[in-house]
Image (spheres, grey):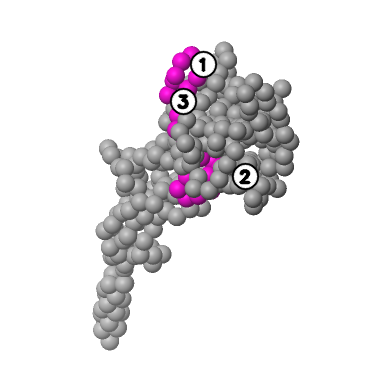
Amino acid sequence: MKRLFQNYLAICGALLLCVGCGSEDLTQHGSLPSSIADIELGTTSDVRPGQPMTAQVTLPVGGENYTEISYSWQHDDNAWNDASNIEDGKAYRQFTAAETPGNHSLSFRARYVYLAPDVNGNLSGELISTVNYTVETCDVFSSKWGDSMEKTIEVYPQTSKVDETQCLGAFPDPFAWNTFNPENINRLFHFEENRLTEITDFFTYTSSKAGGYIYKLQSACLDAEESYGFTVVRSYYLSVGEGTSSTTEINLLKLDGEERDALGARMAEGGITLTVELTSATCDLRMNAGQGENQGEVDYMRTFTSKP
């Protein structure tokens, strides 16, 4: 009887051992790579608003039991965009720095879809790398007074050197009525001893209505005040005659109706040139407008100079 009982216990133990082996989780779980590399920026010092930037990051390696990997970039809190430039185990990104001065970020994400859940039951996982950069506050647009020509061309790659004292480029009009499809203007950068001292925007404009020539200036002044911190100091027109000229002060922003139309017609016909003087904390701005080379055209010029 005693031997029978011992045999019974041995059989029960073997059965329990088999049950234990059957309950062991033999599933091959999905898993992420152990880490993701840091993003490398082409430059992190003295970054200007809208400056062209480059970034690269080494793709993570490792992980198990996944069926799909996707890579994407995110600038600040904007939507994630697919990483389209991947080569030799790295992802590359060309972008423009934020327009607003202050701290900003660029993130890279590697997202994995598993063939089987991970140990926590998740069907996917992701690794994210983030780099921060700071956009500098500038004196006018993306420039600081005293910038070298080399720095200016770096910040504005659409510019090219004219001579030792000037470089020239085409830019969307910062004061355009249609901000979604602005007209292009010419911008000339002036240097003294390789230090930026003046910026000149110039372009030609044609209006179907005489008052539109004045409204073009009014709109630019309002935008300069609201978006760039300028204040109108004075506005006036110069009457051009045979050997004589006289200056008449006006309140440009108050002109409307027939008065605006009449002044616009005189300007388009070459009878007057119009000037508006503005100022900000870091620079002075003079806007000029006068008859263009061809009938119905008016030439506009905006000159930004550093404050004394």
**Rendering quarter of residue 40:** top left
**Which amino acid type is shown beneath numbered disc 1?**
Thr
Side of 266 relative to 280 (left or right)? left
Query: How far across and how far down the image is residue 84, in percent?
Result: 32, 46
Closer to us: 14 or 93? 93
Q: Which residue is mark 1?
A: 165
Closer to us: 40 or 209? 209
Give the class, few, some or many, for how many residues have Cα within 10 Å of label 1's Cα (few <14, many ≥20). Answer: some
Task: Examine the structure image and report whether residue 205 is included in the region drawn in magenta.
Answer: no
Asked if residue 46 is positioned above or below residue 219 in the image, the reply reads above
Q: Is there CB contact under 8 Å for labels 3 and 1?
A: no
Q: Which residue is mark 2?
A: 262
Asked if residue 189 is positioned above or below residue 279 in the image, the reply reads above
Residue 105 in sight: no
Cα separation, mark 1 vs mark 2, equals: 40 Å
Cα separation, mark 3 vs mark 1, equals: 11 Å
